[in-house]
Image: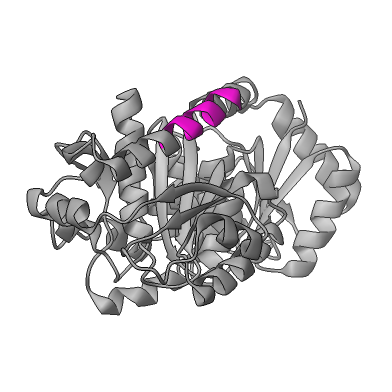
């Protein structure tokens, strides 16, 4: 198996030069431009070796090393420190922090190759890295991202009832994560307001978004589903800028349950663009009105532009009101130029009753026609999950 080397350096030229030298030697290269991102990548990728610059803003290489050595998951990864300094005290500080070897910039390719080869040859990480990665892949759940082109189309209602339908069919571990900071509604609907789980994770450093921390912030509900709620505080909308946190969070959630349903809200922000490619399927919620169809077609085209196969995008028609203004399903499909996987008939009383009983409507009234449509959608997802 190709050995992976993570390079952590704020100097772009160094990243390119060193990365190119090592790629020519047959190594797989990953790069991070600061300490926080480097810590997150080390936890996520478990590289065979880390090349680490000492002089970086915000968090220097010494502190990065200390944190790597404190974490059981990264404690044994060999660390080769780079520095422009040659003083003995600086090297001593590096070794005391936990570095395994030291090179002074600029370094000759032959010298770099020799040090890398020597560290990898005696690394205790070799066998464990492969097994850790394979276990992580085996344990990754089936991730479903739900979104719409604009607000008011019922994304959260569709997402939470889809999660409930999947749980009803499988009794397996199901997580519903509301990734819409400052716009949370599901917690209030289920009688669990003032939740700050998502806010806490987005306010943490990337390295602090560990699997254990995410798991500790999940809220168990008597529906059988585990929830990660967004807050209702509008000021938390600013946390949408924490793109790296969203990426790491989605990855962590995928290891915690057989099924993970992500409420991605509306539009296509950078965070959703990063998360959607890692989902197993994407569900776009559409309403049978002209404007909704136009917006939804643009959204689907934009998702396809993320190099996502159109067959992995499911459009669902969510008719929320009983009105003659709703365009029939076949006409919506023709205008959308994308097949409709499921049509949900209007059932405002069903969802109102769900809010009153603090229970997803599918679980509260499973025999209802609309609830049956959610259960049928869950069956389609189960078929795809089992076929992957």
Q: Main secondary structure of the magenta part?
A: helix
Image coordinates of residue 220 in percent, x first then y, are 19, 39
Image vertical order of residue 132 relative to residue 200, above or below: above
Highlighted range, magenta: 378-388
The part of the image, by quadrant, that contains residue 83 is: bottom right
Q: Nearer the viewer, residue 103 or 258?
A: 258
| Horizontal arrangement in the rendering, residue 154 relative to residue 382 (left or right) | left
Which residue occupies the extreme front position in the image? 324
Image coordinates of residue 174 in percent, x first then y, are 34, 35
Residue at 36% x, 41% y: name it: 374
Q: Nearer the viewer, residue 120 or 208?
A: 208
Whether residue 64 is visible to the viewer of this picture, yes or no, is no
Q: Nearer the viewer, residue 270 or 199?
A: 270
Whether residue 337 is visible to the viewer of this picture, yes or no, is yes
Quarter of the picture holding the C terminus: top right
Image vertical order of residue 192 relative to residue 182, above or below: above
Image coordinates of residue 301 in percent, x first then y, are 67, 64
Residue 212 belongs to magenta span: no
């Amino acid at each position: 198996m190709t050995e992976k080397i993570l390079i952590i350096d704020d100097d772009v030229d160094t990243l390119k030069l060193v990365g190119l030298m090592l790629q020519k030697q047959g190594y797989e290269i990953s790069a991070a431009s600061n300490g926080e991102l480097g810590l997150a990548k080390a936890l996520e990728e478990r590289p065979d070796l880390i090349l680490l610059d000492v002089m970086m803003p915000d968090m220097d290489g010494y502190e990065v090393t200390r944190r790597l050595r404190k974490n059981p998951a990264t404690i044994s990864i060999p660390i080769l420190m780079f520095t422009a300094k040659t003083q003995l005290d600086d090297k001593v500080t590096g070794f005391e922090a936990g570095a395994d070897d030291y090179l002074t910039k600029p370094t000759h390719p032959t010298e770099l190759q020799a040090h890398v080869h020597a560290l990898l040859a005696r690394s205790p990480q070799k066998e464990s890295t492969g097994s850790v990665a394979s276990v992580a892949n085996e344990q990754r759940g089936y991730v479903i991202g739900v979104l719409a082109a604009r607000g008011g189309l019922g994304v959260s209602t569709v997402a939470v009832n889809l999660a409930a339908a999947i749980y009803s069919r499988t009794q397996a571990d199901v997580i519903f994560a509301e990734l819409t900071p400052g716009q949370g509604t599901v917690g209030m609907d289920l009688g669990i307001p003032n939740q700050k789980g998502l806010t806490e994770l987005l306010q943490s450093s990337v390295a602090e978004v560990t699997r254990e921390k995410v798991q500790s912030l999940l809220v168990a509900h008597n529906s059988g589903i585990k929830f990660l709620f967004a807050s209702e505080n509008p000021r938390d909308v600013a946390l949408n800028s924490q793109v790296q946190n969203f990426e790491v969070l989605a990855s962590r959630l995928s290891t915690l349950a057989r099924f993970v349903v992500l409420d991605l809200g509306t539009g296509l922000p950078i965070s959703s663009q990063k998360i959607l490619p890692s989902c197993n399927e994407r569900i776009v919620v559409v309403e049978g009105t002209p404007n909704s169809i136009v917006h939804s077609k643009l959204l689907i085209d934009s998702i396809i532009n993320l190099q996502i196969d159109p067959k992995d995008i499911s459009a669902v028609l969510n008719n929320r009101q009983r009105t003659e203004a709703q365009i029939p399903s076949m006409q919506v499909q023709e205008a959308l130029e994308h097949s409709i996987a499921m049509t949900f008939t209007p059932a405002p009383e069903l969802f109102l009753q769900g809010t009153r009983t603090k229970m997803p409507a599918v679980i509260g009234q499973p025999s209802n026609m609309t609830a049956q449509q959610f259960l049928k959608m869950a069956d389609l997802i189960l078929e795809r999950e089992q076929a992957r």
